[in-house]
Image (spheres, coloured by chain):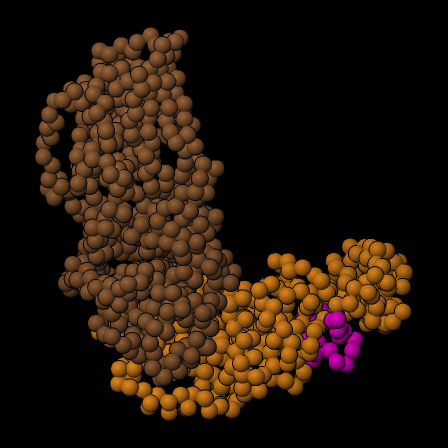
Chain colours: A orange, B brown
Amino acid sequence: MYKWQYQYWLQSVTGIKNKTKQKLVEYCGGAEEVFFIKEKQLASIYGILPEEVQAIAESRKIWDFQKQTEIFLESGISMVTIEEEAFPERLRYLTDCPYALFYKGNYPKNTERTVAIVGARACSSYGRAMALEIGEALSACGVSVISGMASGIDSFGHWGAIKGDGKTYAVLGCGADVCYPRGGRQLYERILEKGGIISEYLPGTAPVKWQFPARNRLISAFSDVVIVIEAKEKSGSLITADFALEQGKDIYAVPGRVDDVPSYGCNALIHQGAGIILSVKELISDLNLDMDKTSVEKEKRKKLLEKEELMVYSCFGLHTKNLEDLVQMTGLSASELSDVIVRLQMKGFLEEPFKNHYRKK
Amino acid sequence: MYSKVTTAVICGLESLSVSVEADVSNGLPMFEMVGFLSAEVKEAKERVRTALRNCGYQLPAKRITINLSPADVRKSGSGFDLPIAVAILAALEVVDIKMLHNTLVLGEISLDGSILPMKGVLPMTAKALEEGMTKCIIPKQNENEAALIPGITIWAVENIKELISYLNGKNYERKADINIEETQIKNITPDFAEINGHRTVRRACEVAVAGMHNFLMIGPPGSGKTMIAKRIPGILPPMTEKEQLEVSKIYSICGMLPKNGGLVQERPFRSPHHTISPNGLSGGGSIPKPGEISLAHLGVLFLDELPEFKKTTLEILRQPMEDKQICLVRQSGTYCYPSDFMLVAAMNPCKCGYFPDRSRCNCRDTQIEAYLGKISRPLMDRIDICVETPVICYEELTGKEKNESSAEIRERIMKAFERQKQRFCGTNIRYNSQIPSGSIEKYCKLDTKQKKFMKKIFQSMELSARGYYKILKTARTIADLENSEEIQQKHLNEAVCYRMIDKKYWE
């Protein structure tokens, strides 16, 4: 029997607080000792509740070492416990720090600069664009992006980081070997190329509702700065922001228009004193990072546009416009406009997130 | 005594002549009918016997045998009553059999001897003329329909007594002259001038109709999809006389010709509700009747709320859209109906309908994909032009700006039709949308620069081969609308703008 097999068992025990697990290990001297300690002695430890003693006793009885070891080894997931030197420093002082972490790939090093990008699942194309842009800019500056791999902003944050050729880590609310949402398989694989998938849950744990708010504390704990892009009035992302506040992290929010429902939470955060993201450039300099040259190039390319194209292009701000809006704004006929739009699209100035909706690239 | 009368039965779209033979001989008194009869034809026996008695012709206590031949074709429909009655009268020598030579007899009779209208008179009369008949005896109410076929004498009769007098030498006089032009009431279709804003959709609509391209509108509820679709009949160019006859035949079989007579002059516009059954769409029954796709022949089939249609119903469209006809195989034979229609469809982008407006749409990505995924990829591939119909803002909605009327749009479309007619002269292609992929090179020539552009489009937009050809065909129509022989870069650009919604939403 190896030490880690007992550690794996200790992490699997539910019904006792993470704090208690730490205390037990400190008191007994290791997970193996916790497994073999007598119930009477266990109950005498100060601060341990009778139901927690019960929970440990129960799980000791039913735990099948051989079977569980097989499951763990087969999953190909690594484990790091708080007992080890390698355990992330950032988590160590968390009030509700998990006893062990499971991960695939890597987890952020102590010296790595990290930023969390979180936001709504049902995001607008504005949010999507911001998440991609911020993710890309940050990772181009060598910052790792941390998020939860949920659909919407989380995913786009990861994708942005992948586009910027940087590291990105996903903290899941299910087992690290479970790809949730299921449609995110491609993203899951891409994250593993440079970064990693992290979870405090045992391999194979199914995604359960209550586990997701809990993993948000890990997302904020892993990051130096938390960026919220699009959060409705009641949003899981605001939970992450609350955790970040508790943990003393910097919070930035992407502002939205006052009547944009998906931006209400962000604007509220700014109201409460979160940092405002005026532009990606400003954000980079706020974080004392080196700006890369991409946006300068864009300005240069703009000079190549024809008069009509420039006119149409100038109608675009951060928000998406549809053809009908543009017909009104430019006064061009529908056929002329569609011609110009496709030209701009092919020159790489515009993209089409949804049928006949266009946006600056 | 023996007599023979000719009548007809509808088989699909074609009419088949049937001879009704009557024999009255000595023997046990009975009335026997043979010849593969359906239930409604068997019932003719009682109707004929009673109607004749009520007209004063008591059937003698003899053995009466009726045979309808050819015996291997199932006889169905209500039009056999009159020919049977006439055949019996001829066999009894009440009427002159010579008068029935080369004559087609059609009609249902009621117990008091009056003659009731029936379906399918138009194709039957047309067929009779082809077969060298000289006279048609038809119900009075079907007179207008049969009058559409010139070159054949029509006797439109109201009751049996009247018919007997004609057959016995009384001169037939047409009761009232009908003037088709006058009797035809023009359908009042709503006008495009009533639509404010929506300039892109109007334009896309014009392009779609000009090349009879299948057309899809995606937009939130209340954005005007149905309103625009309802105005499409107003910009459809008129049908040629040959086309009118083609459509009228289908409507005749279904008994849907205008009551006051005349051909179907306007292109059909059919908009079945989304609860329609597969058979309702394709045509069905043991002797299949034409379905909505055939009733929309040479016109428009409008499917509102496309994803709400049952999947099995929608998938039926695939094959008729390619072949321009549907062949229904039944135990009694194969029935082919034409189905050369332009599909116009409207749908919401997601369940709640407001995507991509995230302040109103709360649907998850997977839900949106599931909603759009209700339409299968193969069906989507058959749609040439797709546009978004945005919600129109208040200023646009109440704007006083004068909009183009349907008549102006229609004029341009007719010119484009003319160009297509000249181009496809001598081929079986009617419109740009029907150019087969093999002839694309011939009809949609591109120069080297444009070819390079299309290559770039093909790669960057991840087009399928079908999608690529569709852009070229649409560009051809746009060029036709501008009266340009060559496809120019701007035509291609506009066509690219109307291409089908991106792949990522359809998987």
In the figure, residue B404 lies in which quadrant?
A: bottom left
| Residue A80 magenta-highlighted | yes
Q: Quadrant of the N terminus of chain A?
A: bottom right
| Residue ID at (36%, 64%) | B384
Q: In the displayed structure, does residue A174 sit left or right of residue A60?
A: left
Magenta span: A76-98
Q: Quadrant of residue A92?
A: bottom right
Q: Give the vertical position of B73 relative to B400 (above or below).
A: above
- Residue B136 seen: yes
Query: Residue B410: percent from the left, percent from the top?
Result: 19, 60
x then y, percent, for residue B461: 44, 74
Residue B36's place in the image compared with B262, above or below, is above
The spot of residue B108 in percent (x, y) is 28, 25
Residue drawn at (34%, 42%) of the image: B13
- Is residue B105 in the magenta section? no
Mark yes or no: residue A252 visible. no
| Residue B69 located left or right of residue B424 | right
Q: Position of residue B109 (x, y in %)?
A: 27, 22
Residue drawn at 42 percent across, 91 percent down = A297
Label count reads: 0
Looking at the rendering, which quadrant does residue A190 occupy? bottom right
Seen in the picture, residue B199 relative to B322 is either above or below; the reply is below
Question: Quadrant where the C terminus of chain A lies?
Answer: bottom left
Q: Residue B305 versus residue A254: which sits nearer the camera? A: B305
Question: Is A124 in front, or is B432?
Answer: B432
Residue A201 vs residue B185, the one in the foreground: B185
Q: Residue at x 37, y 38 (%)?
A: B11
The secondary structure that dominates the magenta segment is loop
